[in-house]
Image (cartoon, helix red, strand yellow):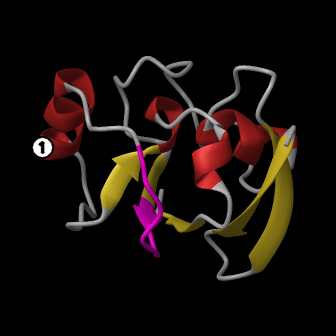
Amino acid sequence: MNEVTITITDRDGITHQVLAPTDMAMNIMEVVRAYELAPDGTIGVCGGMAMCASCQCYILNDVELPEMGPDEDAMLSEAFNVKPNSRLGCQINITPELEGLALELAPE
């Protein structure tokens, strides 16, 4: 499988089903950018370094995700609008295990 289907609810509440490649070393933040699901300059401001939380998202279903690293945990401890299901999209690489993932972009 070279693509997984991911459901992303944008900041306007519109839900999009997108195909994300598993063989291009992309992450959730880059998929959101590629599909233009957030205005330019509002997601991935730090370039995916877990330093700004602009790609924060809420995981809506039970899909196996990589464990949260210390940088992501530290950034989320300082971010706004954090919920128990918050993750940074830049820290979630697109892998076959993400098939069926549903998430919502956190407010700006």
Q: Label 1: which residue? A: 77
User: Would residue 20 be seen by someone viewing this image from the given angle?
Assistant: yes
Residue 29 is situated, as x and y percent measured from the top left of the image, at 62, 39
Quadrant where the N terminus is found in the figure? top right
SS category of the residue bearing label 1: helix
What span is in magenta? 58-65
Q: Amino acid at mark 1?
A: Ser
Q: Write the residue at 80% across / 21% down.
A: 24
Tell me if residue 40 can be seen: no
Residue 2 image-quadrant placement:
top right
In the orientation shown, which residue stands out farthest toward the front?
1
Image quadrant assignment for residue 103: bottom right
* Residue 62 lies in the magenta-colored region: yes
What is the count of numbered marks?
1
Q: Position of residue 101 (x, y in %)?
A: 60, 64
Query: Height in image: 64 above or below 23?
Result: below
